[in-house]
Image (cartoon, grey):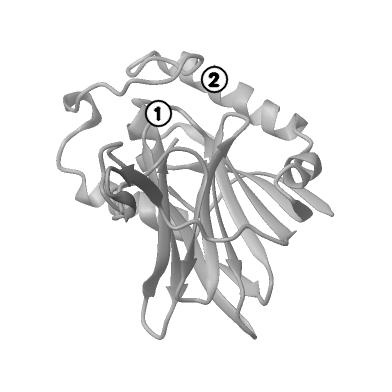
Amino acid sequence: MRTNLVRTVTAGVGACAVALSLALAAVPASAASAPQNLPGVPEAGSPRAVWEAWAADERAEAEATDWEADSAARGCELDEVSISDEVDVSYNRAMGAPDDLATHRVDMVESCDGPAATGGTTLRTGEGTVSTLAIGSGSDCDSTSGPGTVCIYKSSGRIYASWKYRGSGSVSGFLRIYRIPTSASGCYRGDTWLTGPERTWSSGMTRSISKTRTSYSGYSAHIWKKVWIGHTDWGSTCSKL
């Protein structure tokens, strides 16, 4: 198992997403409704020094985390972990922090036996049990057209997205987490919350991305597969976390 503590600001897909979000933003963060952050997260609009101290504490906590034990608790074996600094405008605006605040992202390569796809929630009515596309609460996983399994979950104050590739050979792409309303009826693509780096999956490999959870919301995880020109959405799952 190899641990990489990357202190430079990362580039790649996440950086492209930052540039795109800056170019397309029509409403400044100050004009939007103030986010309702979780306890321990600074209030939206707090002074820069407050946000920088919080981000430094979160980074120090990530460096002190036993990621091997974290992976084992989810039934996986950790192969590699990387902690990278990044400036993610979408993530910052979602919690009301300065656009250029540097935070951290954790990327993992794991070997996992599961989980199996759960495919949404089930409701019991007077006429029996029926399935619904309404998003539920807690961890959720769904099969993708990959073939593979994509999951979204929270653990130890973080939101995770993972995808296990179950096909042959290898494929390239990236994971992205969107924020959606808790009242959402499906795993659509809402506001971008976190974009992982472009990576390659080999058969049986699980890759995960995670970031500090700052508010209660609906979250939708998607795997974007690299194709001849650009990327295609290969599947998703979602939950209230």
Where 175 falls versus 218 (above or below)? Answer: below
The reply to whether callout 2 and callout 1 are in contact (CB within 8 Å) is no
Q: Nearer the viewer, residue 6 or 93?
A: 93
Residue highlighted by disc 2: 54
Q: Nearer the viewer, residue 147 or 116?
A: 116
Q: Is residue 74 left or right of residue 164?
A: right
Category of crowding for the residue at label 1, using alpha-carbon neighbours closer than 10 angstroms: few (below 14), some (14–19), many (at least 20): some
Check disc 2 and report its element: helix, strand or loop.
helix
- The answer to which image quadrant residue 42 occupies is top left
Q: Nearer the viewer, residue 139 or 176?
A: 139
Residue depicted at 70% across the width and 46% down the height: 74
Q: Nearer the viewer, residue 83 or 131?
A: 131
Q: Is residue 2 left or right of residue 125?
A: right
Where, quadrant-wise, is the C terminus in this rendering? Answer: top left
- The answer to which image quadrant residue 240 occupies is top left
- One can see residue 219 in this view: yes
Check disc 1 and report its element: helix, strand or loop.
loop
Where 49 falls versus 22 (above or below)? Answer: above
- The answer to which image quadrant residue 231 occupies is bottom left
* Residue 78: % across, % down: 78, 53
Total of numbered circles in the picture? 2
Indicate which disc, 2 or 1, sits on the residue closer to the N terminus.
Answer: 2
Question: For the residue marked with disc 1, what is the amino acid?
Answer: Tyr
Where 60 falls versus 106 (above or below)? Answer: above
Q: Find residue 216 and name its label.
A: 1
Residue farthest to the right?
Answer: 1
* Residue 171: % across, % down: 56, 78
* Residue 84: % across, % down: 62, 45
Residue depicted at 40% across the width and 86% down the height: 228
